[in-house]
Image (cartoon, coloured by chain):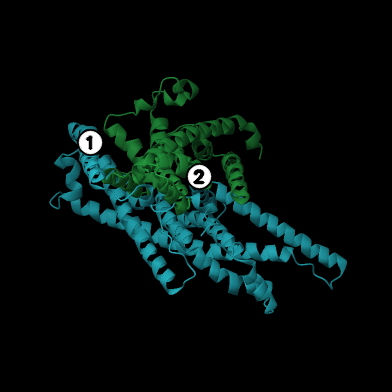
Amino acid sequence: MTMSVLYDAPGPRTRRITWATSAVATTAILAAGWLLVIEPLRRQGQFTAAKWGPIIDPSDKFFPLLWNRLGQGLSATLEAAVLAMTASALCGTGLALLLVQLKSLARRRYSGMSKPVTLGLRALTWLLTGVTRAMVEVFRGVPSVITIFFVGRGLPEFGVKFDDTLWYLVIGLTIYNSVVIAEILRSGMEGLPPGQREAAASLGLSASQTNRMILFPQAVRIMLPALISQLVVVLKDTSLGFIISYEELLNVAKTATQVLSNPIQMYFLVGLIYLTVNYSLSRLAGYTQRRLARSRRAIPAVDVVPALPGAESRAGTGP
Amino acid sequence: MNVLVDRFGLFASGFWLTLQLCLLAAAGALLIGTLVAVLRISPVPPLRALGTGYVTVFRNIPLTVVLFFTAFGLPALGSSARFLAIPGLDLLFPRLGIDLPYFRFALLGLSLYTGAFVCEALRSGINAVPTGQAEAARALGLTFTQNLRHVILPQARRYAVVPLGSVIVAMIKNSALAGFFGVVGDLSQTAESLVSAEGLPLIPVFVGISIGYLIMTIPLGLALDTVERRR
């Protein structure tokens, strides 16, 4: 529903009222912004060259060093994000196929085999289903911060050591996000019309062939918006790397504030960088989505928006 | 595993503090989100722009940055968010009133951040109401406010429950960040201090902390699944 349905196209009187309210509202917003944000900041001396110089003034002695470090931080962030995205997409796909496969195995009766073998196979299926479901529920319900923290602390203790903390971050992010991606794909595959599965079965495809070749590609296309927002979440979540002291953008900025003592300016800058990167990513995703929708009638053009980390688990059922 | 039994009190108090933070932040986020949603559907362009700007900013920056702002930026401005120590409420939630401001900072950051997502959940609820409803109401001559109040919002509320619930579940998980921003004694900070300071074995601590979060997230998730399936 478009918002314009809520009110008529304005006539001359309403237009005048809207103009007047707009003028008042703009004045009020600007005044409030000035009085509540700019003025207190100015009184605290937050607009001085000492605070902003290292960020915007190329002749400042910290300027080259700071931007050099921020560049390194940004590339570290992007590196972790790309690795974690790829790994989560791959593991998520595998896990989704496993979940759906186990579900179709649970329906199988193994006729023609001896009784104990049948029972054994079915018990094994149930066991595997239970274990994977429990894993999914646990890792979906535990905050990714906690997962990353315990991966960073736990793996070295169990003898899995990396020289670079990057890998702990990537593993932690992958554990959480592959579970979420698997759930998105699974609900996409289960939400398809039953005729798809039945037609595949009547063509003689096995359960695993049906899942891989018929259901999965369609689920990916239907769930594309949810999948892409999840990738934006991964990018945002790389900022959790500071917990295991991975030198990403935010951590670099944090270290810099200890020398320059300008937290407000520095975090403003970092926020701006994240905003730019994430906003362009979601715009790009939206563009891809619309292109795909144009070439294939099947996908409705849904706005691709950055999602709240963890809020997508139920994005499943309605495309 | 006897860490779980020995330190049960610590885990329980961590759970209680996280629950307090989540309840307060949920209330704050709902308040902010509703306000921003009202801004975003209002017929006045500057207000709409303000709402859209708010949502775009908070949806595209990580919560970590927001919390850095509140936890390190606000003190640099000489503020300790005392205005959150609402009289009466601070008796129920003593952390609101204490001198150490980090609970208030975390609450503020979490509410501001989640508010943007609450606004989008509400808007998606409004968008889910079939266009014909609003058109019929317009055709009957209802005004903008009457239309919203009697036709759109009662239906939108039903559609918004599930997305809102997902946002709250996500917020509970996000609240874990608070423990890394100076809030003492919540679940994640308990985990950190048990592992780092006391050097307790990791797995039992992880199990205990996870149970704490899962008690909140799983039942809520199941309830939402049920609501969704019933529709």
Q: Evaluate whether residue A185 shows in this view.
A: yes
Most foreground residue, A229 or A130: A229
Rendered residue at 54%/33% (across/down): B14
Q: Is residue B211 left or right of residue B67?
A: right
Q: Is residue B194 left or right of residue A290?
A: right
Most foreground residue, B207 or A232: A232
- Work out which residue is located at the far front of the displayed protein and give it: B140
Disc marking residue B155: 2
Q: CA distance from mark 1 to mark 2?
A: 33 Å
| Residue tagged 1 | A28
Q: Nearer the viewer, mark 1 or mark 2?
A: 2
Provide residue B111's location: percent of width, then percent of height: 41, 38
Q: Residues within 10 Å of mark 1 (few under 14, many from 20)?
A: few
- Work out which residue is located at the far left of the displayed protein and give it: A59
> In the image, what residue type sits under mark 1?
Ala
Q: Chain of mark 1?
A: A
Q: Secondary structure at mark 2?
A: helix
Whether A192 is drawn above or below B40: the answer is: below
Badges 1 and 2: C-beta atoms under 8 Å apart? no
Color used for chain B?
A: green
Q: Secondary structure at mark 1?
A: helix
Color used for chain A?
A: cyan
